């Protein structure tokens, strides 16, 4: 009778082969389960929460993803006190988007404290070319910080005989257009609106460049009734959530 077959850790060769087969089978099963789970995750429909998150991200990127002409359309409809619709025409878009360059110094600290990323500006003239309005989009990281800034920034104000409207959005003049004379000294009105992560400011005056200090008697906002409508139109367009298209590279679902 020959010597017993050698063993390793108490197991013989054939027993080790069986163990190896069982282990390999377990790995195959685990890999199959993992691949099945990954396939199901990649091919399932996104949840409502994921769609909402994707929509919020898309809105927050619009100030960079959209061309300036989409943020500030060439023409914006407004309704004057006469009741019929008219159109304000864009005179130009300011290339500088620095936060500190877009507003008076009294407002820089407030928007900076809440994470201002940029201030986009464009100037419009009303249909009769008598009123000029600069519209400014102040960009924040999210709607919550935009809302806090909105509540801290000064509200609407018209001429009251004390001089220029301040603090406010900086006026943006464009040489060779009806807005060529619109300077900070000519600001006579300001408004504020908000949509999503954006606060939209406007400042208005007269196209003849008349200084606000020359207006000795406070007037109702009738001459500038179109300004808040322009601001609201821009805010609404920027913040309106679109239905996510998860197959498009524009979206992150």
Image (tube, helix red, strand yellow):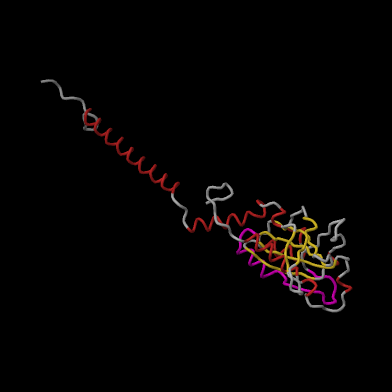
Residue drawn where x is 72% and y is 54% of the image: 69
Whether residue 165 appears in magenta in the rendering, the answer is: yes
Say which quarter of the image contains residue 62. Answer: bottom right
Q: Is residue 87 left or right of residue 248?
A: right
**How many numbered marks, from 0 up?**
0
Residue 80 position (above or below residue 14): below
Give whichever of 67, 149 is nearer the camera.
Answer: 67
Which quadrant of the view contains residue 163?
Answer: bottom right
Q: Residue furthest front?
A: 84
- Secondary structure of the magenta portion, mostly? loop
Is 171 inside the magenta-drawn segment? no
At 21% from the left and 28% from the top, the residue drawn is: 14
Q: Quadrant of residue 35?
A: top left
Residue 119 is situated, as x and y percent measured from the top left of the image, at: 72, 58
Q: Position of residue 9 (x, y in %)?
A: 24, 32
Compared with residue 244, is residue 154 higher up or lower down, i.e. above or below? below
Taking the image as shown, residue 182 lies to the left or right of residue 246, namely right
Task: Decide which of 123, 115 is in the foreground and name it.
Answer: 123
In this view, which residue lies farthest toward the bottom?
217
Q: Position of residue 174 (x, y in %)?
A: 84, 57
The residue range painted magenta reads 140-166
* Residue 182: x %, y % from top left: 85, 63
| Left or right side of 238 for 191 | right
Which residue of the protein is positioned furthest toward the top in this rendering?
2
Name the residue nearer the viewer: 186 or 90.
90
Q: Quadrant of the N terminus?
A: top left
């Amino acid at each position: 009778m020959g010597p017993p077959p050698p063993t390793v850790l108490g197991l013989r060769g054939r027993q080790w082969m069986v163990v190896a087969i069982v282990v390999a089978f377990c790995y195959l099963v685990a890999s199959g389960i993992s691949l099945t789970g990954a396939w199901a995750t990649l091919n399932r429909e996104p949840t409502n929460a994921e769609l909402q998150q994707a929509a919020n991200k898309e809105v927050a990127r619009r100030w960079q993803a959209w061309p300036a002409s989409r943020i500030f359309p060439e023409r914006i409809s407004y309704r004057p006190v006469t009741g019929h619709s008219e159109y304000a025409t864009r005179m130009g878009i300011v290339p500088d988007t620095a936060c500190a360059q877009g507003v008076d110094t009294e407002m820089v600290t407030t928007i900076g404290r809440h994470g201002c990323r940029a201030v986009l500006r464009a100037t419009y003239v009303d249909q009769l070319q008598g009123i000029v309005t600069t519209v400014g989009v102040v960009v924040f990281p999210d709607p919550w910080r935009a809302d806090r800034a909105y509540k801290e920034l000064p509200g609407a104000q018209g001429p009251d005989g004390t001089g220029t409207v301040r603090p406010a959005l900086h006026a943006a003049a464009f040489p060779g257009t009806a807005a060529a004379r619109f300077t900070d000294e000519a600001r006579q009105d300001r408004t504020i609106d908000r949509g999503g992560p954006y606060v939209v400011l406007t400042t208005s005056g007269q196209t003849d460049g008349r200084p606000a200090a020359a207006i000795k008697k406070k007037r109702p906002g009738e001459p500038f009734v179109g300004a808040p409508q322009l601001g609201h139109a821009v805010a609404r367009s920027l913040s309106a959530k679109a239905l996510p298209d998860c197959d498009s590279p524009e979206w992150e679902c």
